[in-house]
Amino acid sequence: MNAKSFDCDVIIAGGGPTGLLTAYLCAEAGITARVFEAQPDVGLDLRATSFHPPTLDLLEESGLTDELIAQGILTYSWQVRLHPSGERAVFDLDTIKGDVRHPYRLQCEQWRLQRALVARIARQNNAQVEFARRVTGFVQDADGVTVTVDGVQGPETLRARILVGADGLHSVVRETAGIPFEGEAFPETTLVVTTTFPFDQHMEGIGIVASCWTEKGNIAFLKLRDYWRLAVYLKENRTVEEQTTPDGVEAALQEIIAMPDRYPVQRAWPYRVNQRIVPTYNIGRAVLVGDAAHVNSPAGALGLNGGIHESFELVSALRDVLKNDKGLDRFDLYTRRRRPVVAEEILGQAKRNRNRMREKDPDRRRALLAELQAIIADPEKHHAYVRRASMIDGLRMAAAIE
Ligand SMILES: Cc1cc2nc3c(=O)[nH]c(=O)nc-3n(C[C@H](O)[C@H](O)[C@H](O)COP(=O)(O)OP(=O)(O)OC[C@H]3O[C@@H](n4cnc5c(N)ncnc54)[C@H](O)[C@@H]3O)c2cc1C
């Protein structure tokens, strides 16, 4: 088959944040891309809500950073605290002002990034997003990939030079390519709750991003413009079903601060956390990005940010393969740059954050808090800690790998 028979350079399975960003960056690089998204539109479910400083630097050139900042709120610190005493360790993002152009974290829903990308892609003539179309499989040969896409008009077969699997946790591209997804599902279930209850008026000094040990468990507090989003770690000695009924959710909130009235809850839903990563990011012309390649605990807000960093790295590889006559082994460098950094700086950090917050013993909690406070008291250690937690180290490590 010759080049004329290709429908586009790159087919992207999945129109989540990484698929859409990959398509947009491809279009900017003069690579034609078609995104197929199984859902009928951008899903408004609440997932990632934090954008780290280097992510804001990366998105700046496209104007996305300013567009998202206009829709979110900025925080210049984050904290780990003991509830109800309010003792805390507060990390200050000002310490990294010499490392990045945006020394703050943005709190903004990930669907806002997706919507902004869909609008940008619509203005490009070499990229498009097709909703309600599911990639069901593919075969590859020496020249390209033949991809089957389903939709209301029935299955269609398309040809591209590269297939990108940005199709998330249950990636069809990863499974069809036979790439294992190594790791584990954590036993605990987390309950995500959104509420307009003003925690800042009831918890002295609580920041916009706060991980709290509570008497009976732990809760992550994340403030968005109009509401708080809480990740409540459910109790393992009671069923998920009983803890996720309206009364179960109310009981969990009443445990934080007892109030005479019911809490104003907008939404509440449980999710299970997986911690997995692929051994390789590609098999020939099928290449993975984002959650299709790795998933982790949300503790530390690293998953989406890692996927965004990866899209930039992937498009640099695609540019080399499709525009600069580099062979498919260019994707080896993509794996080499991403896999160790993701394993240690994303999965490793997320797991350490999760384990710290799961500690139940009061003395051990105080010791952990004291360790964090000691880090903050030492300017060099504080700087190093914030730099790493903000994913600056991971990006630098990846860039240094040849
Ligand atoms: C509750 C929750 C909270 C989170 N909080 C944070 C956070 O605070 N910070 C952070 O950085 N990360 C967080 N994450 C992780 C973050 O949401 C993901 O890392 C991010 O969504 C990954 O983007 P993605 O585009 O790779 O995959 P996804 O967002 O999963 O997108 C994949 C897309 O592919 C589509 N799809 C699937 N199969 C097919 C197919 N066969 N054909 C076509 N389309 C298909 C899906 O419909 C979906 O739209 C959170 C995740 C969850 C679940």
Image (cartoon, grey):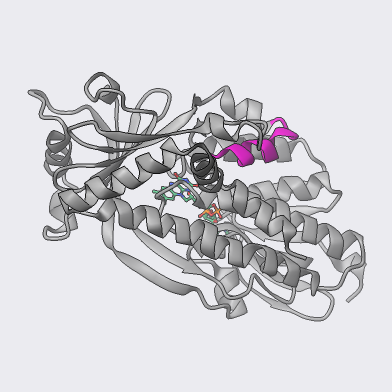
Instruction: Report the quarter where the C terminus lies.
Output: bottom right
Question: Can residue 64 be seen in this snapshot?
Answer: yes
Residue 16 position in % (x across, y down)? 56, 50
Q: How many marks?
A: 0
Q: Is 155 within the magenta?
A: no
Q: Residue furthest top?
A: 201
Q: In this image, 156 relative to 256: left or right?
A: right
Q: Residue at x 17, y 33 (%)?
A: 84
Q: In this image, 170 relative to 96: left or right?
A: left
Q: In this image, 284 relative to 363: left or right?
A: right
Residue 58 position in % (x across, y down)? 69, 40
Q: Observer-nearest residue: 380 or 20?
A: 380
What range is drawn magenta here? 52-63
Q: Residue at x 56, y 61 (%)?
A: 342
Q: Taking 270 as reference, is 187 above or below it?
A: below
Q: Residue at x 16, y 49 (%)?
A: 362
Residue 37 position in % (x across, y down)? 59, 53
Q: Observer-nearest residue: 27 or 306?
A: 306
Q: Quadrant of residue 63?
A: top right
Q: Taking 171 as reference, is 197 above or below it?
A: above
Q: Residue furthest left?
A: 260
Q: Is 54 within the magenta?
A: yes
Q: Quadrant of residue 60?
A: top right
The dominant secondary structure in magenta is helix
Question: Can residue 130 be seen in this snapshot?
Answer: no
Q: Taking 190 as reference, is 155 above or below it?
A: below
Q: Observer-nearest residue: 239 or 223?
A: 223
Residue 297 position in % (x across, y down)? 40, 56
Q: Residue at x 52, y 32 (%)?
A: 93
Instruction: Report the quarter where the N terminus lies.
Output: bottom right
